[in-house]
Image (cartoon, rainbow, N blue to C red):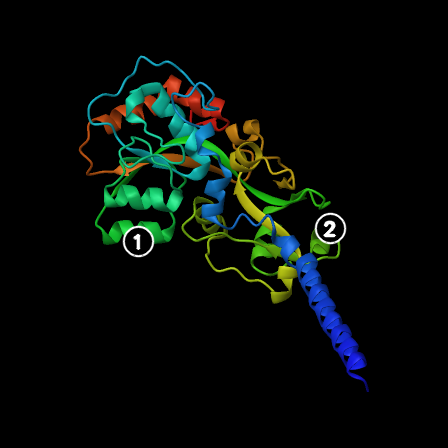
Amino acid sequence: MSKKIKLTLQIVSLCLIASCFLLFNATIYFTFTSKCKTNFNNVNSQAKIIEVDKYLPFDENSKIVKIESNTKIEGDLPILDGATALLPVYSSIAHAIYPEESVKFDGEKYTDDSSIRFTDTKYAYLGVIDGDVDIVICAAPSKSLKDYAEEKNVELEMVPIGLEAFVFLNHVDNPVTGLTIQQVKDIYLGKIISWHQVGGPVRFINPLTRPEASGSQSVMNSFMKTSEYKKNPLQVFGSSIGFSFRFYVEDLVGNSKVKTIALNGIEPTKENIRNKTYPITVEFYAVYRKDNENPNIQKVIDFILSEEGQYIIEETGYVSIN
């Protein structure tokens, strides 16, 4: 066999091998990776989804609720932080009652000497427990965060300030638009593994979870009364179900690829949250250390619970506690 023929055969072989790799990668993408694009699973990536500079206090182009209040906080200003989804709330509060010069943003993030921080539920709670932050606006803490506070001998005061719906999500093209509470629990306990079992297509359900210390995972664990979930290994190749908070999904992110699922036939509307007919209506809180002696903390809490503060919560898109 001539060298030319051998070279040609080698080139053909290499091309066939490369084609096999491309086919393999394409198969993995379309059967697995593409199904998990919207997995609501990484707190840091969620934080990046929200453009912080669109929710700045004292910015004429900001999307926050702007009111001019007669209440003004001076002196030792409590440092505010909170959950990603609640940034518009505490940013609006700072705009209403804090001096403008106390909020410092360098174009990408709040600086260390700003009266506002922007982390996420986990790090906001760690901040208030460690004494680096005074008030955080969050959902209830996870067990690990409660344990951390206990280890530090810190008691937290949790003041309910608003209501929100905890929602389940699937792809917008999925024909399943509603589930019962029991069906959701059975999905996450591994008793229901196919959308066909709940009126959908013959396709595995991929039940997604989030980091344990996130606000939504904490609510999920409370709802399920467990932090242990079961999944058939083949379910990762299925169509996903996830969970989050209504306002985050519908207003802050506005992901057109997902939709919320009705529970027990009830949609997570503001009215159904207000009258608490939606099955998983949860409170969110202003949280601070009980041993924090800053007198302005109570002034901020009083403002949040006032008519003006509750107006901010309503106009932001949540439901007032009153």
Residue shown at the point (73%, 55%) measured from the top left: 196
Residue 219 visible (yes or no): no
Q: Position of residue 279 (x, y in %)?
A: 55, 39
Which residue is at a point 25% across and 41% down the rendered structure image?
132
Q: Is residue 33 visible?
A: yes
Above or below: residue 209 compared with residue 96: below
Q: Secondary structure at mark 1?
A: helix
Q: Residues within 10 Å of mark 1 (few under 14, many from 20)?
A: few
Q: Is residue 163 left or right of residue 250?
A: left
- Residue topped by disc 2: 200
Q: Identify the residue at the far bottom of this view.
A: 1
Seen from the viewer's position, the closer of residues 133 and 260 is: 133
The amino acid beneath tag 2 is Gly
Label 2, secondary structure: give it.
loop
Q: Amino acid at mark 1?
A: Asp
Q: Residues within 10 Å of mark 2 (few under 14, many from 20)?
A: few
Answer left or right for 91 relative to 41: left
Q: Earlier in the sequence, mark 2 or mark 1?
A: 1
Would residue 181 appear left or right of 163 to someone viewing this image? right
Q: Give the residue at mark 1.
A: 147
| C-alpha separation, residue under disc 2 versus residue under disc 1 | 41 Å
The answer to whether marks 2 and 1 mark residues whose Cβ atoms lie closer than 8 Å is: no
In the rendered view, would you say 19 is above or below 166?
Answer: below
Q: Position of residue 281 (x, y in %)?
A: 50, 37
Percent of width and height locating residue 231: 58, 62
What residue sits 74% from the left and 77% below the top? Answer: 10
Q: Quadrant of the N terminus?
A: bottom right
